[in-house]
Every structure is written in structure tokens, then in C-alpha cells.
Image (spheres, rainbow, N blue to C red):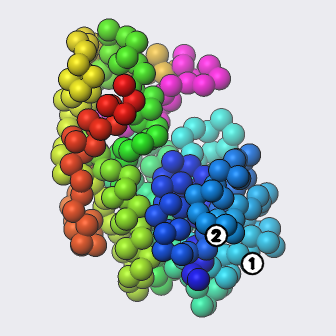
């Protein structure tokens, strides 16, 4: 049985990935630092197949042994604010330490790193900068790796729609940051999980970058209108200039559970679409599913 270590495996993407890989009889190790529902994670696979382990630092001896014995290491770990630590420390420094550990392991040193579409062109974001520097360090220092750059991921339980749909249900007015003119290219979570499974099974030598994206490009205005249409409700989309949006987000960040923060707001200031110069789902013989239809199903299920 092959062993996969998944950092950040308790999150939305990780749980879907565990379900997919468990069907292929992988032993799955889930290192975590924050409190998590270990029993729920174990139930995503068969008995003894999914093993959560808590660690304080990446140099914990138990964790190092798991990394050493793993066939593949996947890093989904990320952060969206700097309230506890900087992006430089929480993202870049962690990836540097992980890569340096893998470099010493001659037998198994294949890393799959989750990045995001457009991180190489988003110079105004400290978070994107830390992720892009991580990509470059991985490619420079590991002989074998795959960087996965997904678009906005949608599917059952995704954070994007989970935060957005309740607003459409209770409010007649929907804020549209920057007029909703920017474009994005969402992708279905099951396509992402299948793509990672194919990367693992192929284990193509060398360094590779994959862009995972769906078949449709939406402006945020078009996407919001589609949500209202599927909900069969009338909603007034209120354009909010970015200078006002920044003030609103600054205030929201002072609350214990802000709906949006400054890094997430920056996503609305640029297009989030595939460059189409890297490997894609089709290169893994995967036809991405219709995100319009996926959105319709999600809305029906949550109505």
C-alpha cells in the first residue's frame, strides 16, 4: 500500500482528496497543528487507512518518519491573514523547510504543492508573493515535483459558495466589488481531486506546473446573476468602488469572524483565469465538468 502525507488534509480540498485516494487503497497520513475532528477524518477511508497526527513543528521526529516513509507528499497548507503569523513565515518558510527535508530523502522526494492561478502575476499580494516564491524554491531544489494551480474551486462545502449563498438568500442587495468586471474561471472539486490522483499514479519525473480550470469564464457580475437565476430570486447588484470596499473590509477584519479580508478582496481586483501555457486537466485525460451545471446542482441541494 502506497503512503501519501497530506498537509492541510483536514480542509475542504483535503477531505475530497482523501475520499478519492482512499478508493485506490492509499494509506493517508494527515499531519495537523490545529484542533481537528480526527474521527471524521478517519471515517473518510476504511479502518486504519486514514491516520491524523498532531505535530508542533515540522521537525517532530514522528512526522519526519512519516515523511521519510511516504511515497508522495502533498501540501495544501495555506493561510489567508497575518493575524497569527506572516505569509513569509507561515507559507514560504514552511515550504522551504519541507523541501529541505525531502531533499535529504533520496528514495521518496516527490512533492505536490497547491498554489493558485495567477500567483506569478499578482505582485500586489503578499500572500501570492509567498506562494510564488515557494513554487520557485520547490522547482529549483527538488528533482521531481508538481505544482497545481487551480482556479476558484467550487463543490459541496466550498468556502466561496458557502459564504456567498446565504447572502443571496437573506439580502435583496448584493455587493459587487469594483462593479464585478473582473473574470474568473472556477473548477469543480471532483475534477481537482481526480487530477491529483492522476498526477500521483503517473508520477511523471521532473518539475511540472498544472493549471486546473473549468470550461467557463465568468465576470463576477455574470456569476452573481447566475446564482440569482438559479435561486429564482430578484437581487439588486450594488457596485462598490474598491476604495470604499477597502474601508468596509478593514472594519470587518476587526470582528472575530470576518466574511472577507484584504487578501480575499484583492481577488476581485484582477482576472483569475488560466494562462494556458502549462499542463491542464486535458493533459491528464480529464474533461472538466460544466461549472454552470455544477452551480445549479449546488444551489438546488442547498435550497
- Residue 243 in sight here: no
Q: Which residue lies furthest to the bottom in this view?
A: 107
Badge 1 vs badge 2, beta-carbon distance below 8 Å: no
Label 2 SS: loop
Image coordinates for residue 63, horizontal then vertical, percent: 74, 70
Residue 52 vertical position relative to residue 199 in the rendered view, above or below: above
Residue 282 vertical position relative to residue 160 in the rendered view, above or below: below
Task: Say which residue label 2 marks.
Answer: 49
Residue 203 vertical position relative to residue 293 in the rendered view, above or below: below
Task: Say which residue label 1 marks.
Answer: 65
Q: Crowding near pointer 2: few (<14 within 10 Å), some, many (20+)?
A: some
Front tag of 1 and 2: 2
Mark before the other along the chain sequence, 1 or 2: 2
Image coordinates for residue 148, horizontal then vertical, percent: 39, 63
Image-quadrant location for residue 59: bottom right
- Residue 48 in sight here: yes
- Is 71 or 271 nearer to us in this picture? 71
Q: Residue at x 70, y 61 (%)?
A: 52
Label 1 SS: helix
User: What is the distance, in whole Å, between disc 1 and disc 2 at their CAs?
Assistant: 17 Å
- Is 195 or 78 nearer to us in this picture? 195
Residue 187 among magenta residues: no
Residue 267 among magenta residues: yes
Image quarter hosting the N terminus: bottom right
Image quarter hosting the C terminus: top left
Magenta-colored span: 251-271
Q: Residue at x 56, y 49 (%)?
A: 11
Amino acid at each position: 500500500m502506497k503512503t501519501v502525507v497530506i498537509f492541510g488534509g483536514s480542509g475542504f480540498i483535503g477531505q475530497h482528496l482523501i475520499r478519492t485516494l482512499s478508493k485506490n487503497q492509499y494509506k493517508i497520513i494527515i499531519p495537523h497543528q490545529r484542533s481537528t475532528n480526527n474521527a471524521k477524518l478517519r471515517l473518510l477511508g476504511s479502518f486504519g487507512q486514514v491516520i491524523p497526527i498532531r505535530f508542533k513543528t515540522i521537525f517532530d521526529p514522528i512526522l519526519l518518519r512519516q515523511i521519510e516513509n511516504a511515497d508522495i507528499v502533498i501540501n495544501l497548507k495555506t493561510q489567508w491573514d497575518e493575524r497569527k503569523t506572516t505569509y513569509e513565515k507561515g507559507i514560504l518558510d514552511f515550504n522551504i523547510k519541507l523541501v529541505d527535508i525531502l531533499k535529504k530523502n533520496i528514495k521518496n522526494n516527490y512533492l505536490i504543492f497547491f498554489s493558485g492561478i495567477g500567483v506569478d502575476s499578482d505582485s500586489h499580494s503578499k500572500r501570492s508573493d509567498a506562494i510564488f516564491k515557494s513554487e520557485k524554491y520547490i522547482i529549483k531544489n527538488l528533482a521531481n515535483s508538481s505544482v497545481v494551480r487551480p482556479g476558484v474551486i467550487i463543490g459541496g462545502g466550498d468556502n466561496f459558495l458557502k459564504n456567498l449563498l446565504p447572502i443571496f438568500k437573506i439580502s435583496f442587495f448584493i455587493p459587487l466589488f469594483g462593479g464585478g468586471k473582473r473574470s474568473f474561471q472556477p473548477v469543480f472539486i471532483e475534477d481537482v481531486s481526480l487530477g491529483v490522483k492522476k498526477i500521483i499514479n503517473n508520477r511523471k519525473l521532473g518539475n511540472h506546473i498544472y493549471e486546473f480550470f473549468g470550461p467557463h469564464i465568468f465576470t463576477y457580475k455574470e456569476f452573481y446573476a447566475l446564482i440569482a437565476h438559479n435561486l429564482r430570486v430578484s437581487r439588486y447588484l450594488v457596485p462598490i468602488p474598491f476604495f470604499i470596499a477597502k474601508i468596509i473590509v478593514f472594519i470587518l477584519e476587526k470582528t472575530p469572524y470576518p466574511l472577507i479580508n484584504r487578501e480575499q478582496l484583492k481577488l476581485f481586483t484582477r482576472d483569475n483565469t488560466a494562462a494556458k501555457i502549462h499542463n491542464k486537466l486535458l493533459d491528464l485525460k480529464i474533461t472538466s465538468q460544466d461549472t454552470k451545471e455544477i452551480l445549479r446542482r449546488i444551489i438546488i441541494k442547498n435550497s
